[in-house]
Amino acid sequence: MSLKKHKTAHANQHNVRKHVLASGLTILTEEMPHLRSVSMGVWLKSGSRHETEPLNGVTHFLEHMLFKGTETRSASQIAREMDSLGGNLALKLAAEYGDAPPRELLGVVAVSPIIEIGECVTALERPGNALYQWNFVKDLKRRMRRKDRFWPGRFDLSKLAAIKTVREFDEAYTAPNFGFNGAADYYYRASSMRIIERIRVPALVITSEDDPFVPPEPFRDPRVTGNPHITLMLSRHGGHCAFVGPAIGEDDGYWAENQIVSFFEQVKSR
């Protein structure tokens, strides 16, 4: 059997569907009714052979980072950061589309999103969050030193040793390197809260009242609660991206993931 025939047979047997978007992006989906979870893979027509000398090994590094973790971070830790930071970006993107979202955008989900970055950074500065702050700053400094190894002299590392907070880091590096007039300007303009009322696609937001550095108050704002397109799940407990419970029967205990699957099942059926 030829490779082409083999692929076709495999696709038919496992209900794999192929969609090519107007942008040229190819999406392959496979529905598995017996599973209550979603997995995603990304393939690029580029790999190790296309790497320039300064980037040798970056493709393999990204593979390990996203799916296997790193020496200092597990895959679940990376996923939690993507949930938090990516949630704000997903909501902001949906809001920027406003009344004219692309037809491919069926809906968005945000878990423990930092929709008001300034308030989150302020919460991070509480004494009880000192360990979180120290860990975030340590990772930010490590990333800057790594950048300097690849692009020597592009960033001024003389300020790095004195930085003790995320706010100080953003003031020294994030804001000036991305065109913002200081950390406060960055927090204000990059927060999805500025335009969240413009969201016109189904949006699910999951967060908790006991999140140590994502305060619940912004989620009670009328711009959120008054938007009929936003479904807000504000639980009493769950911390930051830690919505789990006991596994009972077909329920695997991953509460947030189950809510996301149910949400998109409803969106798909509309």
Image (cartoon, rainbow, N blue to C red):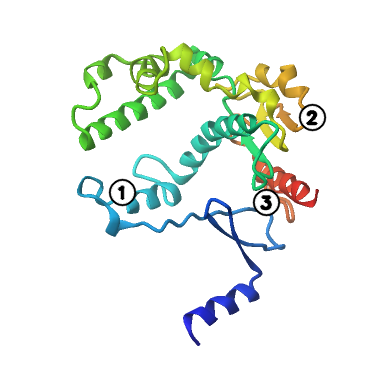
Nearest the viewer among 89 and 130 is 89
Nearest the viewer among 158 and 136 is 158
Q: Which x, y percent locates residue 258?
A: 70, 46
- Residue type, label 3: Asp
Residues at marks 3 and 1 touching, judged by CB atoms closer than 8 Å: no
Q: Which x, y percent locates residue 9?
A: 59, 79
Q: Marks 1 and 2, Cα distance to the nearest angstrom?
A: 43 Å
Question: Tag 3, which secondary structure?
Answer: loop
Residue under label 1: 58
Question: Tag 2, which secondary structure?
Answer: loop
How many C-alpha atoms fall within 10 Å of the one at disc 3: few (<14), some, or many (≥20)? some
What residue appears at the point 45 percent right and 57 percent down from the top-left corner?
43
Residue under label 3: 252
Q: Nearer the viewer, mark 1 or mark 2?
A: 2
- Residue type, label 2: Pro
Residue under label 2: 228
